[in-house]
Image (cartoon, rainbow, N blue to C red):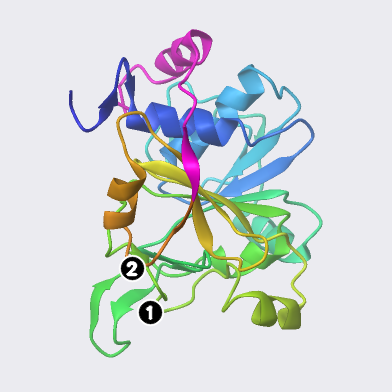
């Protein structure tokens, strides 16, 4: 079996269904540029259990794009097949208000134990290796109800004890700093990777294993992570996509971006 396949479903399709399960009616989400997975999750939620859910695809700033077909980037002009679009300047202002977006889909070239994200640089500021695309909207993570972190890379280079540059705040340095900052949002709620899903200990605010994907062990997840994870035994298995979900995703994604 390919490492990118789980039974009849790809890992990316599994990640989409997990993220979609976190979305609810009357919520509004925002995402960045390279975002085929959250785009698919948002549209899947609309077509199944959350028809009144709404989202904005960063880049084109299109509102509720129809995803016909699913595209790899939120800057793709085909996303303008949507209910409407708003100016980027207005989206940035809405991100900073704190009363518009319930969910922010985030990621990074580094993600640390407290859910802080780095999109700027790895290593020293003077000699980065590599350099990322920049923070863009990530500084506004603390203004949304909850943050859903996703990444297709689960290795010790991505998951580090402490990010080299703080692009988007998670739980900062832990309970003391989080409380002192008095941030408005709820912080990171879940992390979804090709190996597992992770949540955060409400007392320590550190990342912990919630479920492992089929065929993956908690030991493999720990080996791929650059900090100590909390694990509660027995570890649950991530629910597989339903046939209905896969049918919808395959119709949405005829080019196989998720496969």
Question: Magenta stretch?
Answer: 232-259
Indicate whether residue 257 is drawn in magenta: yes
Residue 40 visible in rendering: no
Quick check: 164 above or below 22?
A: below
Q: Secondary structure at mark 1?
A: loop
| Residue, disc 2 | 132
| Residue drawn at (49%, 72%) of the image | 167
Q: Is 19 left or right of 154, judged from the image as shown? A: right
Indicate whether residue 17 is drawn in magenta: no
Spatial distance from mark 1 to mark 2, Cα to Cα? 12 Å
| Residue drawn at (57%, 27%) of the image | 43
* Image coordinates for residue 133, horizontal then vertical, percent: 37, 65
Q: Residue furthest left?
A: 1
Question: Residue 258: which quarter of the image?
Answer: top left
Q: Nearer the viewer, residue 115 or 219?
A: 219
| Residue, disc 1 | 164
| Residue drawn at (54%, 68%) of the image | 168
* Image coordinates for residue 180, horizontal then vertical, percent: 74, 83
Q: Secondary structure at mark 2?
A: loop
Cβ atoms at labels 1 and 2 below 8 Å apart: no
Quick check: 215 above or below 57?
A: above
Question: In the image, which is nearer the foreground, mark 1 or mark 2?
Answer: 1
């Amino acid at each position: 079996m390919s490492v990118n396949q789980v039974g009849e479903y790809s890992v990316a399709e599994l990640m989409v269904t997990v993220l979609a399960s976190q979305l609810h009616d009357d919520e509004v989400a925002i995402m960045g540029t390279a975002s085929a997975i959250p785009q698919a999750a948002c549209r899947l939620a609309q077509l199944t259990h959350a028809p009144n859910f709404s989202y904005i695809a960063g880049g084109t700033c299109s509102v509720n794009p129809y995803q016909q077909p699913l595209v790899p980037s939120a800057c793709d002009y085909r996303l303008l097949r949507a209910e409407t679009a708003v100016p980027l300047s207005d989206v940035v202002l809405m991100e900073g208000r704190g009363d518009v977006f319930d969910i922010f889909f985030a990621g990074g070239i580094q993600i640390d134990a407290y859910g802080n994200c780095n999109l700027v640089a790895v290593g020293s500021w003077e000699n980065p290796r590599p350099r990322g695309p920049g923070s863009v909207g990530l500084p506004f993570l603390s203004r949304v109800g909850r943050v859903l972190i996703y990444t297709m890379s689960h290795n010790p280079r991505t998951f580090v004890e402490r990010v080299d540059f703080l692009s988007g705040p998670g739980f900062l340095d832990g309970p003391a700093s989080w409380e002192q900052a008095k941030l408005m949002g709820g912080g990171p709620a879940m992390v979804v990777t090709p190996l597992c899903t992770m949540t955060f200990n409400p007392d320590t605010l550190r990342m912990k294993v919630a479920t492992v994907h089929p065929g993956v062990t908690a030991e493999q997840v720990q080996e791929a992570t650059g900090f100590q994870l909390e694990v509660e035994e027995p570890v649950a298995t991530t629910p597989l996509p339903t046939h209905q979900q896969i049918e919808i995703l395959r119709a949405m994604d005829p080019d196989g971006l998720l496969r």
